[in-house]
Image (tube, rainbow, N blue to C red):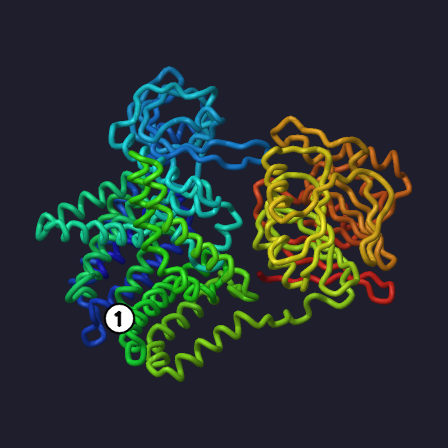
Amino acid sequence: MAAVALATWVGALLGAAVVQGGSIGRLAGGLGLAGLLLGVGGAILGVRRGALSRAAAAVLALVVAGAAVVALAHGDPVRHGPVGALAADRASVELLLEVTDDPRRVDGRFEDLTVVRARVVAITARGRSWRLRAPVVVLGDDSWARVPLGATVAARGRLAPADGDVAAVVDPRGPPDLRTPPDVWWRVAARVRAGLRAAVADQPAEQAALVPALVSGDDGGVSEDLADDFRTTGLTHLLAVSGTNLTLVLAALLGVGRWCGVRGRWGLVLAALGIVGFVLVARTEPSVLRAAVMGAVALLSFGGDGRRRGLRALSVAGVVLLLLEPTLATSAGFALSVSATAGILVLAPRWRDALARWLPGPAADAVAVPVAAQLACTPLVAGLSGQVSLIAVVANLLAAPAVAPATILGLVGGLIAVVEVDVGRLVALPAAWSVGWIVTVARSCADVPLPAIGWGTGVVALLALTLGSALLAVRGPWLVARPARALLLAGLLLLVMLVRLPTPGWPPAHWRLVACDVGQGDALVLATGRPGEAVVLDAGPEPALVDRCLQRLGVSTVPLVVLTHYHADHVDGLAGVLAGRSVGAVLVTTLQDPPGGVADVGALAAARGIPVRALTRGPAFTVGDVSLEPLWPEPGPSHPGPGDGSTANAGSVVLLVRVDGLRLMLTGDLEPDGQAALARERPDLRADVLKLPHHGSRHQDLGWLDSLGARVVLVSVGADNDYGHPNGPLLDHLRRSARVLRTDLDGDLAVVTDDGRLSTATRRGP
């Protein structure tokens, strides 16, 4: 059955490769994976005298072909049906939509958007109408935020091509027109979700956001900073609906049922009702259905012969899910869920038995389960994130005791809050305390010097990691069977995590400026000449990236943070700068736009008691060995912008920095008009090093850039970004007179002086 499940997965992958482009490269990759997985299937079925049974091979080949046909039949109408064809032409259409997920607010480049997943049931365009079922994504304004799940709405708009499992992206014109309200079960589920939020509304913000996320996957209130710590520590599964959630809920439900005398088949009926209720509350999207299946598999694995029953159930569930929803074949979440469940079923018993020789049974189980799940998922996680978590097992062990009370009491409190809020809050209070402990674990474990190590995502690197994980899975029980070996292994792991080892050759001696590789964003670090101290200019888009860069540089004190403007790619990482560091003040531009960035910066600074002051053109001031002269924006009071962030670049703070005989021009995202104004007001400006404005956008005042006479140009830019940054002809022009370095190609970029000589150094890697 396991071999059949793997063959089904291979067939679905091949069908998806054809549907989503059908390129030779993707098909070849799918065939290669097919060979690998079929080889695993052959090992499972058993090898007789060196040859796989012909009948088994024929069955597997038929399964692969059948699954591929199902995937093609499922995906082809989505990609190439009427909706996909109209989207390719960017046609204007009239739509009748069924809303299939809760509206979600996201930050756009210039304004916030409301993302709504829906299903087209009728479409009219170019004088023709179709009745069909095709998934789409709507990118609407605030009026779409109030559309309830399960409702049917009419809308007008323009279609655009889409990637993934949807037929098109809808750009609506105007608000939705509600035609049919949600069915009663969706209204009840919405009441329960509202009850969950109400039950913990009076708790601290992180706990109030995490309880609904843990119980029902409602993670809209979880901050990006906290989510990043959960990713680093291997606790991300707690922020999404997983099989663990359902297993805990069903175990509690069946326990109550037995106490009430429910036995035999009626227990199965109760479990089935519990699964249906869970899916409705957590939403019927593929990830939730996957979690429901994995939770049911976990329940089947309880009791005698649980391993065999569990593997058979997992295999059957995989086949059914892939045939019903072939897009799961390319889903990272599906692969991680299956891998973790299989790891627990196959590996955990041997680890538990080995540990039980010297540990109490419950303690052996507590260690074996997260170790098995982590080993099974490590190659996949590394392929997706480029890193291997070292702290994940420890974090999961510490968090595990709090998961059950947080999930069960949070759900019970939310159900009661639907009827009586005050009683619900009282019941949910221990759940809030429990998630408070989980937050503490995530924060503390993410702050260890080396919570994760970088790992390549190439074939060789991942193959080596897979072989290493397999070797550890097989030999690990022998290592932990005796306390001396187990404690030595644990001690070595703790030593690696807790003792920071210097990066060879980094930071370079006499470094003055480092442009951190933070993806599509800016984060610059200026050494002040004092040990462990630096001025930070912008914070990039993600807290973890700038935090790791500052850790590599050994920065523990930041007398000043300068935020050139409030776009997300410059301010969203501010929490990473503040994490574990002494920060004196935050200097900002006078143009307070977009409002979301302004509010986030203000809230973070206020929570730490850090003053925020506006910075405009004026005299130079010094911090240690560094002189900073603000050149832009022009003097004046702080003022709001249009509210969509479209003019924020024009208000960027520009600094001329002098240090050790060098002049550094740090420009934020200043636009050509501002560059031209600076050229008029300060025609004498010269710089040895230029931080190229706006990530190398083609919109520049070339005359001003050339007039600076820079010998080194730094470009802070993200790999494969959607904006076309940096502009090739612009860089070719600058290379005629300067050395151009890019963070997307070269990693962290350092400007170095030694006896007055300017040089550079780079560092690749995480």
Q: Position of residue 194 (x, y in %)?
A: 36, 35
Instruction: Give the residue drawn at x 66%, y 58%.
Output: 748
In depth, the one of 665 and 627 nearer the eye is 627
Q: Is residue 573 visible?
A: yes
> Disc 1 marks which amino acid?
Pro
In the picture, the quarter occupied by the C terminus is bottom right
User: Is 765 displayed left or right of 650 in the figure?
Assistant: left
Residue at far right of view:
684
Estimate how packed mark 1 is, as few (under 14), some (14 to 19) or many (20 or more) residues with alpha carbons within 10 Å.
some
The residue under the point 19% across, 53% down is 255
Residue at the farthest left position:
264
Residue 254: percent from the left, percent from the top?
Answer: 18, 51
Along the line of sight, which residue is nearer the eye, 429 or 353? 429
Q: Which sits in the foreground, 409 or 131?
A: 409
User: In the rendered image of this protein, does residue 261 appear above or below residue 364?
Assistant: above
**Which image quadrant is residue 639 in?**
top right
Q: Position of residue 7 (x, y in %)?
A: 26, 57
Callout 1: SS = helix
Which residue in the protein does label 1 denote? 349
Q: Is residue 723 above or below residue 408?
A: above
Describe residue 712's horizontal placement relative to residue 593 as left or right. Answer: right
